[in-house]
């Protein structure tokens, strides 16, 4: 998706290492350790110490009806909003409880980016870095 249509390129907001986490390089370092679990890569990764401790393993919960789906925000599953990133938009979570399936919002190719197929094409090139896959790829 050409780094979110250029939104995540260096000339918009340069990815930087986070103080105290030398292998954690993100576009929004202020998200690390802000007491809110940014439950998607690159924030919720080992390199970023699970979002600076905001995403504690013990805070993950199973989702009713999806025994293999264990997430930080179970209320995001099946809420009619496609949370288009792992762990929500995965087979284990039945593609965000169906929110990311074709009958709610079909993924579409983005004009000018032939290999970019996303649920929210309006996010591409909107001057905000959507710093998670599939947008920032």
Image: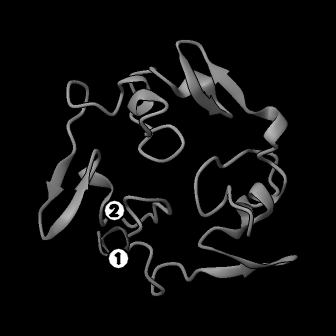
Picture colour scheme: one colour
How crowded pointer 1 is (Cα within 10 Å; few <14, some 14-19, many 20+) is rated as some
In the image: residue 17, left or right of residue 119 = right
Task: Describe the element under mark 1 as helix, strand or loop.
Answer: loop
The tally of labels here is 2
Of badges 2 and 1, nearer the viewer stands 1
In the image: residue 90, left or right of residue 61 = left
Residue tagged by mark 1? 6
- Find out whether the residues at labels 2 and 1 contact each other: C-beta distance under 8 Å: no
- In the image, is residue 32 above or below residue 27? above
Residue tagged by mark 2? 126
Task: Describe the element under mark 2 as helix, strand or loop.
Answer: loop
- In the image, is residue 13 above or below residue 95? below
State the image quarter where residue 30 is shown. Answer: bottom right
In the image: residue 15, left or right of residue 110 = right
Q: Which residue does the image show at 58% across and 59% down from the upper left? A: 41
In the image: residue 3, left or right of residue 35 = left
Q: Residue 134: which numbered mark, if any?
A: none
Q: Quadrant of the C terminus?
A: bottom left
Q: Which residue does the image show at 58% across and 13% down from the upper left? A: 64
**Farthest residue toward the top?**
65
- In the image, is residue 97 above or below residue 128? above
State the image quarter where residue 97 is shown. Answer: top left
- In the image, is residue 129 above or below residue 61? below
Counting from the top left corner in percent of width and height, residue 132 is at 49, 59
Query: Rounded to the nearest whole Å, what is the CA distance between mark 2 and mark 1?
Result: 9 Å
Foreground of the two, 57 or 34 = 57
């Amino acid at each position: 998706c050409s780094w979110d249509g250029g939104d995540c390129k260096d000339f918009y907001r340069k990815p930087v290492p986070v103080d105290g986490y030398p292998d954690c390089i993100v576009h929004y370092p202020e998200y690390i350790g802000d007491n809110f679990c940014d439950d998607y890569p690159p924030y919720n990764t080992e390199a970023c110490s699970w979002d600076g401790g905001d995403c504690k393993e013990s805070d993950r919960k199973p989702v009713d009806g999806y025994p293999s789906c264990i997430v930080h925000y179970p209320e995001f599953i099946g809420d009619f909003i496609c949370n288009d990133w792992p762990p929500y938009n995965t087979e284990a979570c039945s593609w965000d409880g169906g929110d990311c399936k074709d009958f709610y919002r079909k993924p579409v190719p983005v004009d000018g980016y032939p290999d970019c197929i996303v649920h929210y094409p309006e996010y591409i090139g909107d001057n905000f870095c959507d710093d998670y896959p599939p947008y920032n790829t």
